[in-house]
Structure formats: C-alpha cells, structure tokens
Image (cartoon, helix red, strand yellow):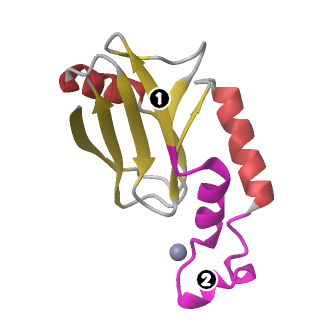
Amino acid sequence: MRHFRRELWFNIPTRRAFINITDQVSVCVKESGIHDGLALVNAMHISASVFINDDESGLHHDFEVFLERMAPHEPVSAYRHNDTGEDNADAHIKRQIMGRETVVAITAGKLDLGPWEQIFYGEFDGRRKKRVLIKIIGE
Ligand code: ZN
C-alpha cells in the first residue's frame, strides 16, 4: 500500500470564511501517484471544519446565517467556554456542526466526487495560521 501526507496552511484575514480546496486536494492525489484508494482531508484545529458541498455563494451565505443562528458569536459572555478568556466558543460549536473531516474515494487516479461536490475548508476563528491534513492511502 502506498501513502502520502501533506499539510495545507491557511491564514484567513477574517474570523469566518469558506475556502474551496478541491484543486489543492486534486494536486495531492496526482502527486501521490495513487490510482485507487482513499483521501482523508481533516481540519487540524477545533475551530475549523472540512466538509463537502456546492460551491455556490448563496448557499455559503445561508450556511453563515444558519450557523450564526445556531451559535451566534455575540454576546461572547453567553458561553461558559469564554470564561477562560477566549472568545471562540461559537467557533467550536460551528466546527462541530460542519464536521471535522471528509473522506473521498480515489478512482483511476482522480477524486471520485459526485455531481457538484466540492471540498471546503470552513474557518470559524481565523486571523491566525491554521492547517488541514491530507492523507492519501491506496495503490
Ligand atoms: Zn476555544
């Protein structure tokens, strides 16, 4: 079995953002030389997500509205976690809703995604360096 590991680094200038990383994952699949296998893509931080969905700006706006309704950033004093001096309790909850990782099949040397499926990095507490792990196994 072959294996491949790479970290993608981000320093998002805003608190929250959704970044399409499909092309970067595809490059890794190509570099790995793996023809059939699995690609794990996970956020390495507990206030960020990796998920698969449509690259459509209206939908991303809807995600933002939904997540703010479920776990609003303000007032920060509403969260026990923020008693630690942090202000990112909402980011931990948003990450939990959107998920830590995704796994994509690799078939014939390519990501075997469904129609309109794209891979996203979801940032919920940005303005600092954070990373995503890509691990590919197969043959
Ligand atoms: Zn925290």
Q: Position of residue 46 (x, y in %)?
A: 49, 63
Quadrant of the image for the C terminus? top left
Q: Is residue 137 left or right of residue 13?
A: left
SS for callout 1: strand
Q: Nearer the viewer, residue 130 or 113?
A: 113
Look at the image and say whether residue 93 sits in the magenta stretch.
Answer: yes
Position of residue 1 measured from the top left corner of the image (x, y, whole percent): 23, 31
Q: Residue at x 69, y 37 (%)?
A: 61
In the depicted structure, whether residue 15 falls above or below residue 34: below
Q: Give the residue type at disc 1.
A: Val
The structure residue drawn at horizontal position 63% and vertical position 48%, both measured from the top left corner, is: 98
Q: How far apart are the alpha carbons under marks 2 and 1?
A: 35 Å
Q: Is mark 2 within 8 Å of ligand 1?
A: yes
Q: Say whether disc 2 or disc 1 marks the residue closer to the N-terminus.
A: 2
Q: Residues within 10 Å of mark 1 (few under 14, many from 20)?
A: some
Q: Mark 2: which amino acid?
A: Asn
Q: Residue visible at 31% across and 34% down?
A: 136
Relative placement, left or right, of 98 versus 26 is right
Q: Residue 82: which numbered mark, if any? A: 2
Q: Magenta segment range?
A: 72-101
How would you rate the neighbour count of disc 2 (Cα within 10 Å): few for under 14, some for 14-19, many for 20 or more?
some
For disc 1, the marked residue is: 104
Could one spot residue 121 in this view of the protein? Answer: no
Q: Which numbered dot is residue 94? A: none
